[in-house]
Image (cartoon, coloured by chain):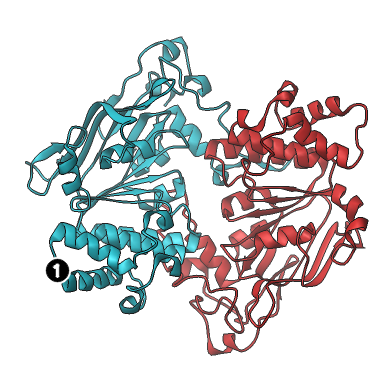
Chain colours: A red, B cyan
Amino acid sequence: MNAPLLEVEGLTKHFGSGPAPVRAVEGVSFAIRPGEVLGLVGESGSGKSTIGRLVLRLLEPTAGAIRFAGEDIARAPERRLKPFRRRAQMVFQDPYASLNPRLRVRDIVGEALDAHSLARGRRRERVGELLELVGLPAAHMTRFPHEFSGGQRQRIGLARALAVEPELIVADEPVSALDVSVQAQALNLMQDLRARLNLAMLFISHDLDVVELMCDRIAVLYLGRVMEIGTAEQVTQRPRHPYTQALLAASPKADPDAPKLTRLLKGDIPSPIAPPSGCVFRTRCPYATPACAEVIPPLRDSGEGGAYACILDSIPERTEAA
Amino acid sequence: MTVTEPLLSIEDLEVSFRTEEGTVTPVRGVTLSVRAGETVALVGESGSGKSVTSLATMGLLPRPAGYVSGGHIWLRQRSGARIDLAQASAGDLRRLRGAEIAMIFQEPMTSLNPVLTVGEQIAESVRLHLGLGRADAHRRAREMLELVEIPDARRRVDDYPHQMSGGMRQRVMIALAMSCNPSLLIADEPTTALDVTIQAQILALIERLRRENGMGVLFITHNLGVVAEIADRVTVMYAGEVVESAPVRPIFQAPRHPYTRALLDCLPARAARGPDGRRRVKSIPGLVSRAGVGCGFASRCEHATEACRDGVVGLENEPERIVRCLRWREIA
């Protein structure tokens, strides 16, 4: 059994101070082993993007521990983070906003090499290799971002992240801005790179089909808390938490004979400034009892290393829920 | 006139834009119909021309650059008379919009007026189209918010758009669209900006209103899951043309056009396990490009021949299905 590459424990992030901060992330724990892909799924306000930024120390955590290869990341001063910054990289959602429009691709990717004094004297050659790794012709390194399509730009973002040979990539909605046919190319490329480079990933997405495809394990978030975590198969085929069930039921299937969307969750996602007491999901949960308002449900073992946060011992099967 | 005669019938529509570099024609060869009481999904990826088609139908093309350069957009009015929206006067269009055809958009925040309360916006529309007085219009606004299941409508009618969540704003947009009982609703990606649990609520709402009012719905989306959920019939667009049109089951279970087939295979849910144990999706090689002649999909199609690249590829009519492909029978 491999030791975890990334360990997160009790991670908490509040934005703003005073009596009513935005409680973006509350006590989140998970681990990622080398080469493993963990998916974070959730809707707006679930805290998934905030977690991605906290893990890379692009945001300062309010509380909790982050360990990368056994070293404390959450508290280390910035000057001591440089080796970590080479080993963990980010890929962003918007391939239009995340590339400097005034730089040529050669310099967008090359900057990452320069920052860590890599490939000195053979920068040009290395950039060409990286572009070919992500399926772009090396000759395109003299072009500017606007000369590429959305899917090609996402490849450039990947090449930049891979330039420093990271062990962990945080990918925040990396294919959400892409059309289905282009998304398919990008997903396949990421699968190839994973296999070739033994990359671990924190894969953030709102799309359950994409997460099921890409991830070994999945954590389901709601209002900054983990509702359920487990293997991709466990979470998508045998969900234990009512929210996981609702999320799966609400995702339209590309099959006209699939059961129609029934038993809809009522109401809106509550504000993270004033989250409900007890279980944060209880205001929309079809099975909520008065006890759910009393205690924050601890994570319970669901086997195979999985866990879920619900005090109910059993909830009806998804198929019976309609 | 029979009941089955379509409410909306678009025939060989072509839309052009005048630009500094000359005229471009992003939409050509669009043929589709919507009958009363049915939902037709118009599906396509970025640049397929689906939104331009819907804007042309509403008479909302950006003037003077954009214009209908060919074909017809027939609307059957309540009076029974047919009108070609492609040729209609500005006055006719203004009369029809809201009253007979209504449209909802992806981003309700930019389509609602931020300085008016949601009640005032609905009231304005019903006073204009239904000639109601001030008090009746306000009551109608509240009733419309109740119709779209906004909790506490009596109070929320005085809210401004920014005081509402994205899902609630989309409900307001729908209330606004429904306020004059349109016979045709055009919905352009109405759930794309919403979370899935909220999307499910909005889809159920549109479905309920369609059933209760018997209106036709033209639902524009890129999301094939949403299509399977809501559509009776599906029209697929690629590079400005309709490539296939059929009822929803045949589209998903026996697609005929190579693009429709390839698009469905791109879905992550249809991924197959590769030799390394990881799942891969099929993908479509290359990018959308619009050649002058021939089939628009030929450069990416595994079945393409010389004839596909060089010849004119027309729509073939089958019972309950149209396909724009020279080889669909051979490859089926």
Question: Does residue B303 appear to the left or right of A48 in the view shown?
Answer: left
* Quadrant where the C terminus of chain B is found in the figure: top left
Residue that label 1 marks: B133
At 77% from the left edge and 57% from the top edge, which residue is drawn? A58
Residue B101 x, y percent position in the rendering: 22, 49
Q: Position of residue B54 (x, y in %)?
A: 32, 40
Q: Residue at x 29, y 69 (%)?
A: B119
A51 or A261: nearer the viewer: A51
Query: In percent of the image, x 43 and y 53: which residue is there?
Result: B107
Q: How many numbered discs, if any? A: 1
Helix, strand or loop at label 1? It is loop
Q: Chain of mark 1?
A: B
Between residue A218 and residue B328, name the one nearer to us: A218
Q: Where does the image place residue B69, in percent across and percent down from the top left?
A: 27, 25
Q: Nearer the viewer, residue A59 or A55?
A: A59
Is the residue B238 above or below the residue A272 in the image? above
Q: Amino acid at mark 1?
A: Gly
Q: Is residue A248 visible?
A: yes
* Dot 1 alpha-carbon crowd within 10 angstroms: few under 14, some 14 to 19, many 20 or more: few
Q: Quadrant of the N terminus of chain B?
A: top left
A78 sits left or right of B269 in the view = right
Against A86, residue B16 (above or below) is above
Residue nearer the viewer, A11 or A37 = A11
Query: As drawn, is A286 to the left or to the right of A152?
Result: left
A54 versus B34 height, above or below: below
Q: Is residue B70 above or below residue A301?
A: above
Using the rendered view, name the quadrant where residue A147 is placed: top right
Q: Where residue A241 sits: x, y (%)?
A: 60, 71
